[in-house]
Amino acid sequence: MKNSIDVSIIIVSYNTKDLLRSCVESVIKNITHLKYEIIIVDNNSGDGSKLYINNIAKKYKNVKCFFMDKNIGFGGANNFGMNKSTGKYILLLNSDILIENNVVERVVQWMNINSGYGVASANLYNPDGSIQGTGGYFPTIFSVFSWMTIQDLPFVDNLIKPFHPMKGNSPFSNRAFYYKERDLDWVTGAFFMMRREVFEKVGGFDTDFFMYTEEVEYCVRIKAQDWLVRYLPYEGVIHLGGASGNTGDSILKEFEGVKLLYKKHYPRWQYPIMRVILKIGCLWRMFLMGIIKGRKAGSIYAKAFFKT
């Protein structure tokens, strides 16, 4: 019967067989008082994931698996999984996540009490125990300018709500921001819990966003329907992929995502201004990162400058 399951956990996999195994095992080990299902959507992996996924589905009756015939992206695969789900809550979980400390149950309990919130996320940690950035505020012209240029300076975030509050390359990293429970505009898609009513009313991800910034765009539409988004500083979510930091590919895709977000949801006159800000920021970072981290780091932003 629909909603007899407390939470549907959607895990999208693409060539992450070993990570996926650890993720699923951690979920099974750490959820003891909820009725749940795990829905694995494989994006046409070529690393032998299919055999493991089929085996785990045979072993556990509450694990369902689906195989795409091509990589349809993070948003598209999650949409497919959500359409197959039946739970009262839907948890989108990256395959490079490890669950501990009954964190899923704690977030569900919080959502049960706080009915005005459509989305919630918990605290994400690197494997070494250091905290990760887990959401922020919608990007404005001022906040993107700050993000690209001056945000590493102290007290800037007190004046301009940050798109990304965490500043990993700065001595003023702002980790304390994530010690406190608070409302945010968006939270990371790596651990993204929402009510079924949100999905039914708002729909799924915009598949024009193949990867990066898709959860920001999703939250724009969710908040437009008067749902609130909450960050909960609950420990128990280890994000293995987050430890590696930004790659050149992720930087380029995030800039593209911000541009697309502006095309879709902001006044038309702001889009060219946003492009200029991103280009200025790329030049600044190309110079700064080239000095701090070397030529390779600088070349990433040189590439981003011409693509932006």
Image (cartoon, rainbow, N blue to C red):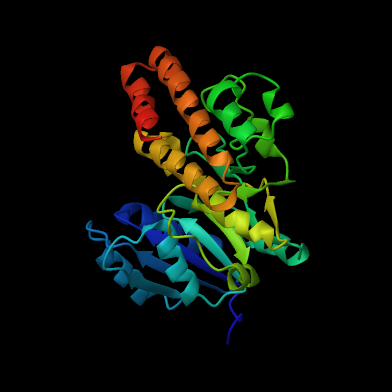
- Which residue is at the far front? 269
Choose top left, top right, bottom left or bottom right for residue 90.
bottom right
Relative image position of residue 78 (x, y in whole percent) = 45, 64
Asked whether 86 or 273 is in front, the reply is 273
Res. 227 in view: yes
- Residue at the spot 58% in from the left edge and 43% down from the top edge: 134
- Which residue is at the far top? 291
Q: Is residue 205 left or right of residue 176?
A: left
Quarter of the image where the N terminus is located: bottom right
26 up-or-down from 125: above or below: below
80 up-or-down from 157: above or below: below
Q: Is residue 220 left or right of residue 37?
A: right
Asked whether 257 or 134 is in front, the reply is 257
Res. 129 in view: no
Asked whether 164 or 14 is in front, the reply is 164
68 up-or-down from 232: above or below: below
- Residue at the spot 49% in from the left edge and 25% down from the top edge: 281
- Residue at the spot 50% in from the left edge and 61% down from the top edge: 205
262 up-or-down from 159: above or below: below
Q: Is residue 89 left or right of residue 97?
A: right
Relative image position of residue 49 (x, y in whole percent) = 27, 61
Relative image position of residue 7 (x, y in whole percent) = 58, 70
Asked whether 38 or 287 is in front, the reply is 287
